[in-house]
Image (cartoon, coloured by chain):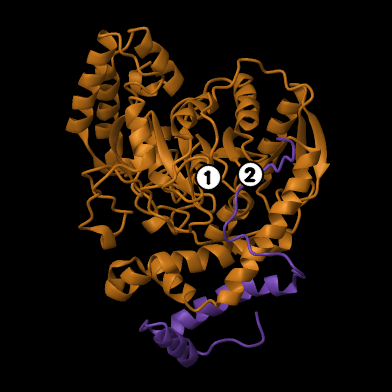
Amino acid sequence: MQPYELSLAAAADAIRDRRLSPVELVDSVLDRIEKAEPSLGAYVTVAAEQARRAAGEAEHEVAQGRYRGPLHGIPMGLKDLIDVSGMPTTASSRVRADHRATADSTVAARLSAAGAILLGKTHTHEFAFGLTTPQTRNAWDRGRVAGGSSGGSAVAVASGTATFALGTDTGGSIRVPAALNGVVGLKPTYGLVPRHGVTSLSWSLDHVGPITRTVEDAALVLTALAGHDPRDPASLSVPAADYRPGAGTNLTGLRIGLPRTYYFDNVDPRVETAVRHAIGQLESLGARLVEVDIPMTRYIQATQWGLMVPEAGAYHEGSLRAVAELYQEDVRILLEAGELMSAGDYLRAQRSRTLMRAEWARMLEEVDVIAAPSVPMPAVGADETTVTWPDGTAESVSDAYVRLCAPANITGLPALTVPVGHDAAGLPIGMQLLGRPLGEPTLLRVGHAYEQTQPARALATAV
Amino acid sequence: MPAVELTPPEAARWAARAGLALPAERHAAVANHIHSVVAVLRELDFADVPPAAAYRAVEEKHDAAV
């Protein structure tokens, strides 16, 4: 096994025990980038020299006995919406061509302090406003979409060109590409991970979180990221915690909500089969399945759009009037048309969110976790724009990919996607676990227990 | 779709009021589609429900015991 193939946890153990040096690991991942990047296009920028220099310093620290913890010497990618001092934050947009961040975002600073090493910035669908990330190709099949908007981060982790990465999630943008590329993605509770220094798509829906190869890895990254920062007005005051899940796989006593409605409607049968099989695995570990009815399903898309569209339009108001021609057409038209939405529509969406949060809280009194598909279908072909379901319903690819993710953005609940297999064409399928506010330890425990019942996953094959 | 849709000239006029010069045809179609999606929220009876503009995912615990 080459160092670039190691999970974060395995690499961390090897570095701590001095069986692997950060220099060897970073060199191995940079070599992998050189080989894979031309065919995958996950990165906007690779800062190879900077990464090698940091790896040398990390190696020196370990040799001096100054081990910072499990992220020490671990190479990572950051979605290019996340500020790193001295580097441009391009948002994968020509609008940001001359940008240069003057300070680290909170998450970049925390990862750096924990010893992680920045490899580079990964592609996003322009300004995170889309679900495909057209610059990047799926790590399992280059003719298919990477998913988005954190497509570069997911493809980098899946292909071995980053040991972990960060994404952002406003309507599924961590979970969608993670599911489509066969890796783990965690959208934390709203406010758990500070967004200071991260370009916004929609303030009331935006989250930052890890994309990793295993659930345990996601827990290790979350431990470094979580914690209050008053510079993000939504940031929660929660005590520092170690999110690493225990080794046990016994889920006796845990109640898992199995949706009777919404989450299995208009879902590809291969996805449904794989997810139901995985839920069966959780049951065999001792969990009790409880059927639940998802509340207010008729209003999910309306609420998501009613919040996101005007907030995104407001964020881009100045640039739309100054340099509109620099946006890609798909993003520009949404932002501009969004300005024609009324304040009444926005307030109805905010009030609907109040109702929806209360209904979900009631549902989550009956169960500890809800298990469902992450996305209704595996990665579609890069030129496909709509999907037609057996009942004749046509849905845009973007709407389909957002559909099962949006409830966790609207309600702020934590949601984790875990790979649960592949379809006949070899494309990955993800199971989504949703929990109560600050229920990350439960989600990580369940996801980790599931992974321990499965063979270790190999890296993606489209390189 | 809602009964009353913006025509392209109306979309252009609304956008101009907001300070945007838009090619009206496509924007009217996208704006009307967005409107048709969010209009369903009018069905809800909100009574006294406030907006969640400033919200926390974690409810604050109000404990009378000091």
Residue A399: image quadrant is bottom right
Residue B4's disc number: none
Q: Is residue B16 visible?
A: yes
Is residue A18 or residue A358 the one in the foreground? A358
Is residue A423 or residue A215 the one in the foreground? A215
Give SS at disc 2. loop
At 54% across and 58% down in the image, what residue appears? A397
Residue A191's disc number: 1
Vertical relation: A243 (above or below) A145: above
Residues tagged by mark 2 and mark 1 found on one chain of the structure? no
- From the image, state the color of chain A: orange
The number of discs equals: 2
Vertical relation: A364 (above or below) A212: below
Vertical relation: A29 (above or below) A248: below
* Residue behind mark 2: B58
Image x and y of residue A220, in percent: 48, 25
Extreme residue toward the front, this view = B66
Q: The C terminus of chain B is located in which quarter?
A: top right
Image x and y of residue A118, in percent: 29, 33
At 38% across and 53% down in the image, what residue appears? A199
Q: The N terminus of chain B is located in which quarter?
A: bottom right
Query: In whole angstroms, how far apart are the C-alphas of marks 2 and 1?
Result: 9 Å
Crowdedness of circle 1 by 10 Å Cα count: few (<14), some, many (20+)? many
Is residue A377 or residue A314 the one in the foreground? A314
Residue type marked 1? Gly
Residue type marked 2? Val
Is the residue under label 1 in contact with that under label 2 (CB below 8 Å)? Answer: yes
Q: Is residue A7 visible?
A: no
